[in-house]
C-alpha cells in the first residue's frame, strides 16, 4: 500500500470501538533505511486543549495494526495499555 492511500483513514480500536483519530491528523514514524512504518503518532484527544501547551501524542506501534480497510485502520489495544500515553509491545 502506498502512503497516500492511508490519508483520511480513521484509526479505531478493535477492543472497544474507540476512535483514536484520523491519519490526516497523525504522523508516522518511518525507518529511514527500510522505509517501513514503525509507529503511528496520534494526537491525544484526552488532554486539555491549550494554546500554550505542546501537542501531546500517543505512539502506537505498527505491530498493533490488525486491518487496513477502505475507510479505517483497525488496531488492537487492550484497556491497560490505553491508559498510558505510549503503547509498547
Image: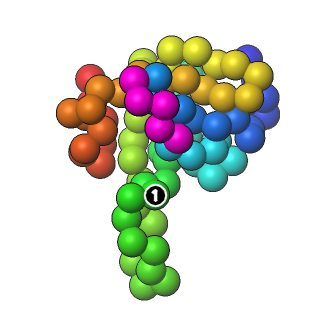
Residue 67, above or below 19: above
| Quadrant of the rendering where the N terminus is positioned | top right
Q: 23 or 32: which is nearer to us? A: 23
Q: Position of residue 35 (x, y in %)?
A: 59, 24
Q: Position of residue 68 (x, y in %)?
A: 64, 19
**Residue 9: quadrant of the picture:** top right
Which picture quadrant has residue 63?
A: top left
Q: Is residue 6 left or right of residue 19?
A: right
Q: Residue at x 43, y 55 (%)?
A: 44
Q: Is 73 situated above or below 52?
A: above
Residue sitting at 70 percent across and 19 percent down? 69
Identified at 76% across, 22% down, the residue is 70
Q: Does the magenta run of residues contain 2? A: no
User: Is residue 30 visible in this depiction of the protein?
Assistant: no
Q: Residue furthest front?
A: 16
**Quadrant location of the C terminus in the rendered image:** top left
Identity of the residue drawn at 39% across and 41% down: 59
Instruction: Give the residue number, with chain letter if any, for mark 1.
Output: 45
Is residue 42 something that shows in the picture?
yes
Q: Position of residue 18 (x, y in %)?
A: 47, 38
Residue 41, x across and y down, in percent:
48, 45
Left or right of 25 on screen, residue 41: left
Query: Magenta residues, as a range?
Result: 15-19
Q: Residue furthest left?
A: 80
Closer to the camera in the image, 29 or 76? 76
Secondary structure category for the residue under label 1: loop
Q: Nearer the viewer, residue 40 or 17?
A: 17
Q: Specify few, some or many for label 1: CA neighbours under 10 Å numbering under 14, 14-19, or 20 or more.
A: some
Q: What main secondary structure does the magenta stretch of the protein show?
A: loop
Q: How many marks?
A: 1
Classify residue 8 as left or right of residue 68: right
Amino acid at each position: 500500500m502506498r502512503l497516500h492511500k492511508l490519508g483520511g483513514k480513521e484509526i479505531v480500536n478493535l477492543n472497544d470501538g474507540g476512535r483514536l483519530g484520523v491519519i490526516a491528523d497523525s504522523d508516522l514514524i518511518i525507518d529511514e533505511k527500510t522505509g517501513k512504518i514503525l509507529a503511528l503518532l496520534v494526537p491525544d484527544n484526552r488532554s486539555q486543549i491549550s494554546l500554550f501547551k505542546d501537542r501531546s501524542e500517543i505512539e502506537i506501534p505498527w505491530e498493533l495494526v490488525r486491518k487496513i480497510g477502505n475507510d479505517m485502520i483497525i488496531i488492537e489495544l487492550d484497556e491497560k495499555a490505553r491508559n498510558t500515553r505510549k503503547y509498547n509491545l
